Amino acid sequence: MWAKNAGHYSLALKLCKEYPSALSADAVAAIGERYLIQLTSEEPTDFALAAKLCPELLGDDVERWDQWVTLFFAMHQVRLQ
């Protein structure tokens, strides 16, 4: 998929939603993971968008949730009230 190869993960995810049979669930998860990495590591970062996308991209994968929550804490992006 050209969008994924060009680093256009947002577009790649949109296309995955439009054509759900085009890629395996593992491939879609990998695109989502790369998008979260892009949002949290490339300037300008967008932790708010990454956090908003986590439920959709991580689903019920406890191990991946743990990884991302740990990253958000490490980057001081968790606000406790």
Image: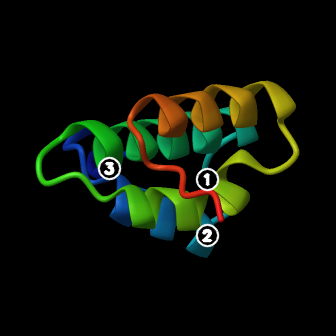
Mark 1 belongs to which amino acid? Ala
Q: Identify the image's colour scheme: rainbow, by chain, secondary structure or one colour.
A: rainbow
The residue that label 1 is drawn on is 22
The residue that label 3 is drawn on is 39
Mark 2 belongs to which amino acid? Lys
User: Label 2 to label 1, Cα distance in Å?
Assistant: 9 Å
* 67 up-or-down from 44: above or below: above
Tell me, for residue 77, which label it has, or none: none
Residue 1: image location, x then y, percent: 37, 45
| Quadrant hosting residue 16 | bottom right
Q: Which residue is depicted at the point 38% across and 35% down? A: 75
Whether residues under marks 1 and 3 lie with C-beta atoms below 8 angstroms apart, the answer is: no
Observer-nearest of 4 and 56? 56
Q: Residues within 10 Å of mark 2 (few under 14, many from 20)?
A: few
Residue placed furthest toward the bottom:
18
Q: Earlier in the sequence, mark 2 or mark 1?
A: 2
